[in-house]
Amino acid sequence: MEEEDDEEELQIPVGIKYKVNIRSYQRIKKLLKKKSPDEKILRWNNKWNTLHSKREEICCSYLTSADNWQEIISQLLSDDVLGVKLSQIPSKEILKAIDQSGTPIALWLRTESKNLDFITDFEAFLQDCSITELPKTIKDKRLDAFAKEIHIGKHITLLWDNPNILPPEVLPASLPEVLH
């Protein structure tokens, strides 16, 4: 007698079941090419350590926003700014600014919609969550959005770039000393 495993499973998005964050492949690739850490790698590591020292503090205190890469990078080079929040998909120049400034956190709305409710909701949840709980807060927003047609949780992307967690193919021996 054959078991009936052919029954289709429900299609549950991965972002509902798990915290889904993106990483900067370019940053990791550059990290592997370096024989010693450069200022960008050191800044990335320092910003990450600062982020974890601010465990209970509110996200919005450490996130900046601007309309162009020049403004963003000038703000991101400050030690007090740990990330960037954008109400639209970032341009290539803004992504490069995030990468080159060693910024470990970036979040943005994936929709080009001019939906003011999304922008208001985006700002509101950043007022209420602690910086280290940001991945969990976004996962919860995605869960809230699952059964709804229109919800901000369906439109948020989070770059959460921890320098201490590297892809499995990266060997510790190939990393600059600062990250060992």
Image: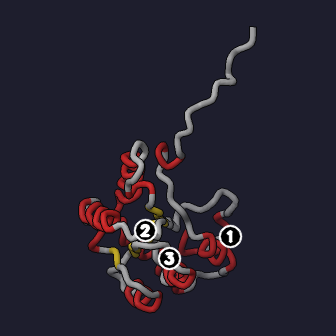
User: Quick one: label 3, few (<14), some, or many (20+) residues within 10 Å?
Assistant: many
Dot 3 amino acid type? Pro
Left or right of 130 in this view: 45: right
Q: Nearer the viewer, mark 2 or mark 1?
A: 2
Q: To which quarter of the image does residue 107 belong?
A: bottom left
Residue indicated by mark 3? 90
Instruction: Inspect this view and state whether residue 53 appears.
Output: no
Q: CA distance from mark 3 to mark 2?
A: 14 Å
User: Local crowd at mark 2 within 10 Å, few (<14), some, or many (≥20)?
Assistant: few
Q: Nearer the viewer, mark 3 or mark 1?
A: 3
Colour pattern of the rendering: secondary structure
Q: Quadrant of residue 51?
A: bottom left
Label whose residue precedes the other's in the sequence (2 or 1): 2
Residue in front for this viewpoint, 102 or 14: 14
**Which disc, if any, is residue 113?**
2
- 134 relative position to 175: left or right: left
User: What is the CA distance from the residue labelled 3 to the residue labelled 1?
Assistant: 31 Å
Residue name at image x 44 percent, y 71 percent: 106
Query: Which one is in front, 14 or 98?
Result: 14
Q: Is residue 45 left or right of residue 51?
A: right
Given the image, on which type of amino acid does mark 1 rest?
A: Ser
Q: Residue furthest right?
A: 1
Residue 142 location (% of width, % of height) = 42, 50
Q: Is label 3 in a helix, a strand or a loop?
A: loop
Residue 95 position, x and y percent, is 53, 78
